[in-house]
Image (cartoon, rainbow, N blue to C red):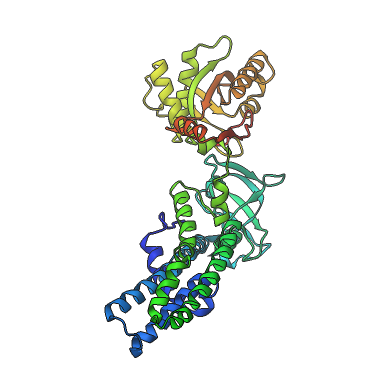
Amino acid sequence: MSTPTSMFSAALVLPACRDAFRKLHPGALVKNPVLFTTAVVALLLTVLLAIGAEPLPLGFQVQLIVWLWLTVLFGTFAEALAEGRGRAQAASLRATKSELSAKLLDGRTVPASQLRRGDEVLVETGDLIPADGEVIAGVASVNEAAITGESAPVIREAGGDRSAVTAGTRVISDSIRVRVTQEPGQGFLDRMIALVEGAERQKTPNEIALTILLVGLTIIFLIAVATIPAFASYAGGSIPVAILAALLITLIPTTIAALLSAIGIAGMDRLVRFNVLAKSGRAVEAAGDVDVLLLDKTGTITIGDRQASDFRVLTGVSINTLAEAAMIASLADETPEGRSVVVLAREKHGIAMQALPEDAQIIPFTAQTRISGVQSGAGLVQKGAVDAILRANPDAAQGAQAADLRRISEEIARAGQTPLAVAKDGRLLGVIALKDVIKAGVRARFAELRRMGIRTVMASVHCRDTDSR
């Protein structure tokens, strides 16, 4: 999705300029009584200037009228800009939805908008899931970062509570068959569009209270100015209408009324620049009252890609044996985790292997096996989730080595890291500890939040003995 990163980009400002003039319609202006009063006065002075009814210098009258209309246009422009922001976000979501296509089971490819509840589609590696649904066959790794913000992919499979999939998420390994569960216009993206389009319509309690105050002040000053001609006439003088109009507009809180929408826009824009989407002015006000910040770990505090930090050997296994086997199993692994294993084996343990043997057969990682590895003349090397490695090597799963493997895995998991088991020719060798890498500058930001009186809490779930790559 591509939305303007700044509230004041050309893509938002130019349409807002056009809409600012459309909002000069009385039916729209009357919703802001102060601006409506200013527009009525500006129109009156414009008519008086056109018929030459005022005995005042032309330059003075023109300048007064221009400033009055600019004040009104500034208020309508600010409101139009706020509405344009919502429309731009909704249009971006619609564009994302319109780009989705579906592979039917008969081999045809159709737009996702033609799918109906109950239709079945095939989603393969690299494809975007075309509609909200449930997996009815297969198992796959799905990247849901576009929806959840979680950078680590998740497993989605038929049956159980992990079968639901969302339109716009991407399958990164294997393939699945999905049954559509929502009718057109009722999916997750459609609900998001509805939320965004209605976001800017919500007024905050403070804004409502301030509007009532401004209306009251306007009525008071209108009455006060209306009495001046009577006093002037009683004193034997007269005051031109343009002077009275200038006095009225000076007295009433015109600027505050025009700035109401602009203040909300400025707050939203500041949040957007820090990658925070404020759906309403109410949310901006609430942000000022925040004193506790709940954060997810992966992809928020950390960079999302885990890195190998240590090799933990089992009893009777040398560290070089484990490091060499881990490197063999990872040389063909192009994921950030696989590359970090190779780097760790080379830099910390001096394993100088540069390439796999010529007869090597690569065993790719799949969501079903959760194991990857290499088969060659030198033997079979496997790397994967601890429980998956134990299932793949049943002869070694019941002995002392298996108990040692589970103990080490428990220690790694309790430390907040992810264990990855390594085996060679049915023999368990040890565990690779994968840790999340803290993003640069996070500590300094936490310190700044503490100075602001905001307490940070990490809310994350750690699944033991799993590898969701």
Residue drawn where x is 68% and y is 15% of the image: 399
Which is nearer the eye, 27 or 51? 51
182 w.r.t. 321: above or below? below
Give the farthest residue toward the front: 235
Residue drawn where x is 53% and y is 23% of the image: 433
- Percent across and percent down for residue 427 are 58, 18
Which is nearer the eye, 49 or 220? 220
Q: Quadrant of the C terminus?
A: top right
- Percent across and percent down for residue 109 are 53, 63
The answer to whether any part of residue 203 appears in the image is no
Which is nearer the eye, 114 or 212? 212
- Percent across and percent down for residue 463 are 64, 32
Give the farthest residue toward the bottom: 51
Give the farthest residue toward the right: 160
Instruction: Give the number of marks.
Output: 0
Query: On the image, which quarter does residue 238 sit in?
Result: bottom left
Which is nearer the eye, 146 or 455? 455
- Percent across and percent down for residue 32 are 53, 70
217 w.r.t. 230: above or below? above
| Left or right of residue 359, residue 205 in this image | right
Residue drawn where x is 53% and y is 46% of the image: 145
The answer to whether any part of residue 313 appears in the image is yes
Query: On the image, which quarter does residue 52 sit in?
Result: bottom left
73 w.r.t. 399: above or below? below
